[in-house]
Image (tube, helix red, strand yellow):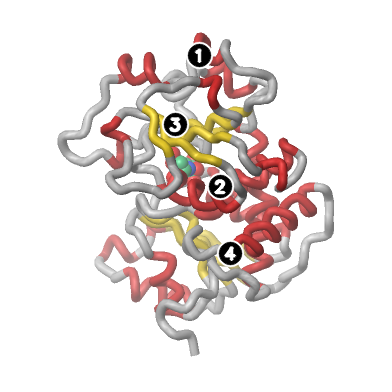
Amino acid sequence: MNLPGRRLGLHSSTNLSSENLKSLINRSLELSRGADPRSFSGRNAILAFFESSTRTKVSFEVAATQLGMVAINFDITGSSLSKGESIKDTAETLASYDPSLFVVRSKESGLSQLFEDWTSVPTINAGDGEHEHPTQAILDLTTLVERFGSLDALEGLQMAIVGDVLHSRVARSLVQLASTCGIEVSFVGPESMMPKYIFPNVVRHSSFEVERYDVLYMLRIQRERFSEGESLEVNKYRSRFSLTKERASHIRRDQVVMHPGPVFPGMEIDAPLIDIDNSLIRRQTEVSIFARMAIIEAVLEGSIDG
Ligand code: ASP
Ligand code: ASP
């Protein structure tokens, strides 16, 4: 029996052990170099996305398909949720189609864990509200290990997570797993975009000194999550925190630029910079497939502890 709260899938970075993280990164890299994926042919993965997404959904779909699974998209706009069916009823109905896996994205925090509690089907969190986005952090760290050559090489790197940290589930997941890898993280942005609570070991800076960091991790301004009264003076923000051409002219060859996507060129980063040699932004998208394959394998084999 699956006891409520017992983890089968991947819901947050908080509970992911260092061994688990390292083996996921190593397996993602093996797959990216052409290792044979495991085969789960004949098994179904249901992707239940209650919040819009293009890249994450497609990336999970491709990953599941590469593992021989059938990926079924649950299209929320055409569902009976809009006719008043509760989310719990929906989860139970979807579970009756006998999936081996759910992948859930939601505006609410904690929905992936609830899906799993209600149905006993292992579930992967593909982003829940402002809470976490653990698969993004795993793929980001895999991309960094690939670039810097080894896990050990990440030890002591300086990473700036720049911009709207307050509303970012990506930042919340990344800060934990980056620390597990020995990376030293700073939050850089205006005071109004800093989280209200303190993260141990994270330094905050209200000015963006590009030269200080090995990794510049730029965040999208998440206006859709602004509460009433929150606003943004775009020009002021750009002059202080965007990766503009002027600011990028100080980047050294050994520094890298990352972004979880989608990028709004001209806001947090100037368009031509997406493709400079230092940019890992396109590689993050490619690596996302291998990282999600590794995560699905581990979940279906029961070896995840997060
Ligand atoms: N926040 C979404 C994601 O990257 C946006 C998108 O899907 O394009 O998961
Ligand atoms: N794709 C990321 C997310 O889903 C980042 C973003 O949307 O800005 O949280």
- Report helix, strand or loop for mark 1: helix
Q: Earlier in the sequence, mark 2 or mark 1?
A: 2
Residue appearing at x 39%, y 48% in the figure = 199
User: What is the crowding at mark 1: few (fewer than 14 residues within 10 Å), some, or many (at least 20)?
Assistant: some
Give the amino acid at mark 3. Val
Q: Amino acid at mark 2?
A: Ala
Mark 3 neighbour class, 10 Å CA radius: few under 14, some 14 to 19, many 20 or more = many
Between the residue at mark 2 and the residue at mark 3, the CA separation in whole angstroms equals: 15 Å
Disc 4 target residue: 17
- Residue 247: give its label: 1
Of tags 2 and 3, the one toward the viewer is 2
Q: Earlier in the sequence, mark 4 or mark 2?
A: 4
Q: Which residue is mark 3?
A: 162
Quadrant for residue 83, please give it: bottom left
- The kind of residue on which mark 4 rests is Ser
Residue at image mark 2: 178
